[in-house]
Amino acid sequence: MQPVNILGDKMEIAYYPGCTLKTNAKEFEETAIKVFEKLGVRLKEINKWYCCGTVYSLATDNLMYRLAAIRNLIRAKEEGYDKLVTLCSICYNTLKQTNLMAKEDEDAMYKINSFMDEEPDYDGSVEVLHPLQILNEMMDEVKAKVKKPLDKKYAAYYGCLLLRPKEVAIDEYENPSVMERLIEALGGSAVDFPLKNECCGSYNVACNKEAVIDANYRIITNARKNGAEAIVTSCPLCHFNLKEIQKEVKKAYPDFVGLPVYYFTEIMAMAFGVKK
Amino acid sequence: MKMVRIYIMGKEYRVPEGLTIMKAMEYAGYRYIRGSGCRAGFCGACATVYRKEGEYKLHADLACQTTVEDGMYLVQLPFTPANKAIYDLEKIRVDDKTLVNFYPEIARCVSCNTCTKACPQELDVMDYIQASLRGDVAKAAELSFDCIQCGLCAMRCPAEIAHYHVAQLARRLYGKYIAPRAKHLEKRVKEIEEGKFDKDMKKMMKMSIEELRKLYNARDIEPEEEV
């Protein structure tokens, strides 16, 4: 097998699950571990980890909310890894932005390292990756593992957190294409979809549901108009906002017609013939 | 006898070296009405916080288990105000949301680890709160097993979590719904309920203390089973 540059010389990478992957998005974790195993890449869950803090913690002057992210990176480093992969877009964004801060903001890190006096100082040396960045280099291997080629038209939905701020983008931040290439490699066809990096409404689902209902209506209707028969995403919150509230969208917009929503690892598992 | 200086609620006392904080306070004239129990590190009643002269760190420990040091500033915390969720263990079910539903403030944890540093039992307190947050009840029960409910974690937490109550719920759920049932225990409870031991009990209740003592000393001690 060709070495995967982004993984260095190892085919094992530290894996940070995040809380949602253990609760609401179990199918995301299960399929991800299985399809990567098929590709010869082991996602090894780190022994100790903590809630990433989720994106609301990224206020630049509130260092307390960065502690969890830094601690997770320290745990990966302590287990001998210099790369850490995480599936959830929110965890990815939080850990990645925090690691950038660790590399660039000496003053902030002085305060954080001083506060966490029970931990070794952290220097930003664990690279945070999203699995799509690994798959980006493995499209030929993906093609080779397909047993049941997908036969539907899919809209790749990235949302915000894989692309912004651009310093942490996993792909071209205005016009990403990695998920479309993945869909094609699995035998499906990827539709052109201008709302692929629109916001799903995020945590508004908890306190301002109308905003999420509107976003859902616009995104799914746009995908459908462009010929999509299903939506593919990487974020448990986008997944929830696009999938779970479709009934409520239908109530607010009687002309609404829903679409099935999948994690990218679920369509991989289908195409690979991997049972859930 | 070598004496050391300690400060109880700011007032200086000289007490003999080598005493525990609890004994030293009694030596200084304080009397424990609450905030003292087993005096052996098991009951969790004698939470104490102290700083040492010239040190920035605030320490937390049990007064019955910690020896006084020269220049120690200390105070007892006989009680921790912490709300306890009300539940009927027979009726609630265990799933990955049970703990966060009863104690939603665990979602406020920022992983500062102050709880872990405060724990006199040296438990991974933050880790069991994090396990609770992601619904891993078994892990929370395991990591908190040695908790003595002194309350120091809850007093130090900037997120105002009542860790030890969360942990107790985790252990109760674990015991009731997750841990395998002990077959031999169920069998024995059934035997008791069916009156297998009633006759012997009645007989013993009529015995004198002397007879009981003899019987007790001559009892069979079952060998410990190998696991």
Image (spheres, helix red, strand yellow):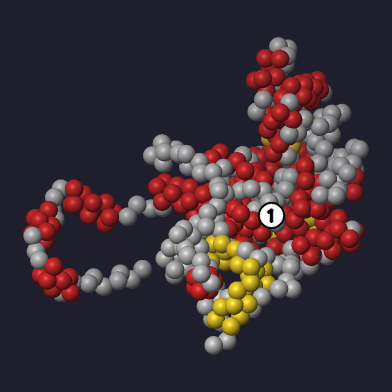
Rendered-image quadrant of the C terminus of chain A = top right
Q: Residue at x 51, y 44 (%)?
A: B84
The residue sitting at 26% across, 73% down in the picture is: B223
What is the x, y in percent for residue B184? 26, 57
Left or right? Give the position of B179 relative to A109.
left
Q: How many marks?
A: 1
Nearer to me, B95 or A31: B95
Is residue A237 visible to the viewer in this orientation of the structure? Answer: yes
Q: Is residue A221 above or below residue A192?
A: above
Q: State the residue at coordinates (10%, 70%).
A: B211
**Which of B39/B126 is in front?**
B39
Label 1 crowd bin: few (<14), some (14–19), many (20+), radius 10 Å: many
The image quadrant that residue B111 belongs to is bottom right
- Report the amino acid beneath label 1: Ser
Residue B38 x/y as whole percent: 42, 66
Quarter of the N terminus of chain A within the rendering: bottom right
> Residue A220: horizontal and vertical position, in percent?
76, 24
Dot 1: element: loop
Asked whether the viewer can see residue A16, the reply is no
Q: Residue at x 54, y 40 (%)?
A: B102
Q: Identify the residue position indicated by label 1 in the image.
A: B111
Q: Look at the picture and state if A208 lies above or below A176.
A: above
Instruction: Determine the image quadrant of residue B107.
Output: top right
